[in-house]
């Protein structure tokens, strides 16, 4: 699983060397070098490698956007299939974790593994229009 990086410590108008950007983002130096190989823009091709803060922030923002997997109302993200899937038979179980939120549990229609999705309790009415929801007690 990919580790998360910090972007709040990266300043827009600052020029970073590779080790400084690694410290600011909370990652290792080889990770920053891999980002450069993947397309992170350098100031110039000379050594030491210098990176503008706004280039680093734009690169990391685009990378995060590519990794995002928005789901439709009745879909689940299957970890085995690595894709969004509908539940088998359009049936799900809702297990409340608090008064305002809970978890939907379903079985993937393709590989039949268990899928989970956290939702707000107020969104449950909209999901009931798409899926057959059975409410289970979490105790």
Image: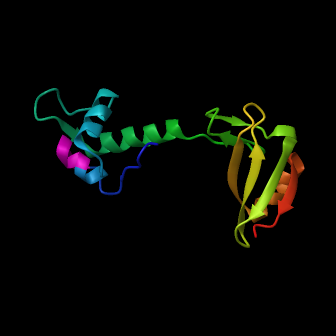
- The reply to whether residue 98 is visible in this rendering is yes
Question: Which one is nearer the viewer's eye here, 104 or 10?
Answer: 104
Residue located farthest toward the left when viewing the structure as drawn: 47
- The reply to whether residue 17 is visible in this rendering is no
Residue 102 image point, x, y percent? 72, 63
Residue 97 image point, x, y percent? 70, 67
Q: Is residue 139 magenta?
A: no
Question: Which one is nearer the viewer's eye here, 51 or 127?
Answer: 127
- In this rendering, the answer to whether 78 lies above or below 121 is above
Q: Is residue 41 left or right of residue 83?
A: left
- In this rendering, the answer to whether 105 lies above or below 2 is below
**Magenta stretch, residue numbers:** 13-22
Residue 24 image point, x, y percent? 26, 53
Q: Is residue 96 left or right of residue 37?
A: right
Q: Residue at x 29, y 39 (%)?
A: 31
Residue 14 image point, x, y percent? 21, 49
Q: Quadrant of residue 115?
A: top right
Q: Residue at x 20, y 34 (%)?
A: 43
Q: Residue at x 75, y 38 (%)?
A: 108
Residue located farthest toward the bottom when viewing the structure as drawn: 99
The image's colour scheme reads: rainbow
């Amino acid at each position: 699983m990919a580790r998360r990086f910090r972007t709040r410590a990266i300043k827009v108008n600052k020029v970073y060397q590779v080790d400084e950007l690694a410290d600011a983002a909370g990652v290792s130096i080889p990770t920053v070098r891999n980002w450069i190989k993947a397309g992170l823009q350098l100031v110039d091709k000379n050594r030491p490698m210098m990176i503008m803060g706004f280039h680093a922030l734009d690169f990391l923002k685009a990378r995060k956007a590519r990794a995002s997997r928005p789901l439709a109302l009745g879909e689940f993200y299957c970890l085995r299939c690595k894709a969004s899937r509908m539940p088998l038979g359009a049936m799900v179980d809702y297990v409340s974790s608090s008064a305002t939120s809970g978890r939907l549990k379903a079985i993937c229609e393709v590989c039949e593994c268990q899928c989970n999705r956290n939702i707000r309790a107020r969104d449950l009415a909209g999901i009931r229009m798409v899926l057959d929801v059975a409410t289970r007690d979490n105790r």
